[in-house]
Image (spheres, rainbow, N blue to C red):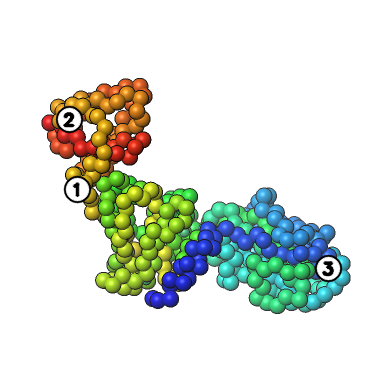
Amino acid sequence: MKYSYLLFILLCQLHAFGQYCTAVGPTSTVDSNVESLTLNGVVGAINYVGCPGVVGLQDLTQNVNVTLNAGGSYTLSVKFGTCNGNYAGAGEAWIDFDQNGNFDPYESLGTWTGTPPAPVQYWTFLVPSNAVNGITRLRVMHREAGSIPLNPCATYAWGSVTDFGITLANGLDCTGYIGDDENDPILVDQLPFSDSRSTEICYSNQNYVYPSPDIYYYFEPNPLMEQVHVSLCGANFDTFLSVVDLDGNVIAYNDDHVECAPQSALSFDATNLGPLYIIVEGWGLQSGDYTIQINANYVGLEEAQSGVFWAVPNPSTGQVKLPSNSGIYQFLDINGKVLFEADTEDQNVFDFSEIQTGVYLIKALNSGHVQKWQKL
Ligand SMILES: [Ca+2]
Ligand SMILES: [Ca+2]
Ligand SMILES: [Ca+2]
Ligand SMILES: [Ca+2]
């Protein structure tokens, strides 16, 4: 799929990581307002009384007093009224059943239009059987002069917006589905790396490039990596792939790779890069199954030797001595895997008589210099 470049730039700047919109609601405390709301759960209830009015969002999510079961039917009672004068408007309520941080159209519980005084609205709704277990939000909005469907993120002059915390149970248990966002990424611990997964359930959109669900991988290039290759070829949906640093700067991205379009693959130069996120998502709203493959080309040993500090003897049958109190040194195999970290604060002689004979690398973390070392 094309047209992605501009969207990518725009959305990277927005960087909205799945949080609820909270800069919403009225700028005035008078007139149109929800007067009362009741929701009886399988456990507990919400019994809310509105007025006096509140500017912006009235956030009542701290107290979670009601539990709803996935697959169950419940009735929300709402009286769209006023704290002062009577004016025509519209009302709507949503529950974020999939816990993606958005009040999606399918999560609307009911709508109302009219002029107060108006009868209490009774909205009977079904909690989807695939609702995600845990604490989520109910939002009720009253917008004077509004029309349905209401935008759950809108700001306006008169009305009210109130959020309640509710517990969802008996639905989808997403415990253990790591990688949903940058705070809980899947660790790429060594290369070559392969991981098969589905974005279909338990993953939500962090609004990275497309509104599709996305999955985060955390990857730290090691000093011997040159080109890193990432591939989603073989996925069963139209994918999009991004590589960003921890500050959100885009290192590389691909929508459709020439060899496996509409799936994605890319390569990037890992020299001098710090930790990265690799983000898998679908084009548009697409989701599905994929296998991510990550591997790298390594620099030659001669090239890797970027500085000289003393590490003696070299070659050695086992012991190696490093300058005392000179920081931490990493011992790496020729694939760049860190085998050992030597802290020279308490001791400066280390014993490697147990490791295989061959060539290793020692990296001084202070200077970043890498030195070749041979075990006899
Ligand atoms: Ca949602
Ligand atoms: Ca996600
Ligand atoms: Ca996305
Ligand atoms: Ca694509």
Task: Give the residue at mark 3.
Answer: 31
Q: Nearer the viewer, residue 93 or 2?
A: 2
Q: Amino acid at mark 2?
A: Asn
* Depicted 316 relative to depicted 241: above or below: above
Give the percent coordinates (x, y) of residue 197.
36, 59
Of residues 97 and 284, the one nearer the viewer is 284
Q: Earlier in the sequence, mark 2 or mark 3?
A: 3
Q: Amino acid at mark 1?
A: Gly
Residue hosting label 1: 300
Q: Residues within 10 Å of mark 2 (few under 14, many from 20)?
A: some
Q: How many marks?
A: 3
Give the class, few, some or many, for how many residues have Cα within 10 Å of label 1's Cα (few <14, many ≥20).
few
* Circles 1, 3 touching at the beta carbon (< 8 Å): no
Locate residue 370: give its quadrant: top left
- Of mark 1 and mark 3, the one earlier in the sequence is 3
Whole-percent x, y for residue 89 in the image = 76, 75
Q: Position of residue 26 (x, y in %)?
A: 75, 65
Which image quarter is the C terminus in?
Answer: top left
How far separated are the C-alphas under marks 1 and 3?
A: 74 Å
Q: Residue sitting at 33 percent across and 40 percent down? A: 368
Indicate which disc, 1 or 2, sits on the residue closer to the N terminus: 1
Q: Secondary structure at mark 3?
A: loop
Instruction: Tell me the SS state at disc 2.
Output: loop
* Disc marking residue 314: 2
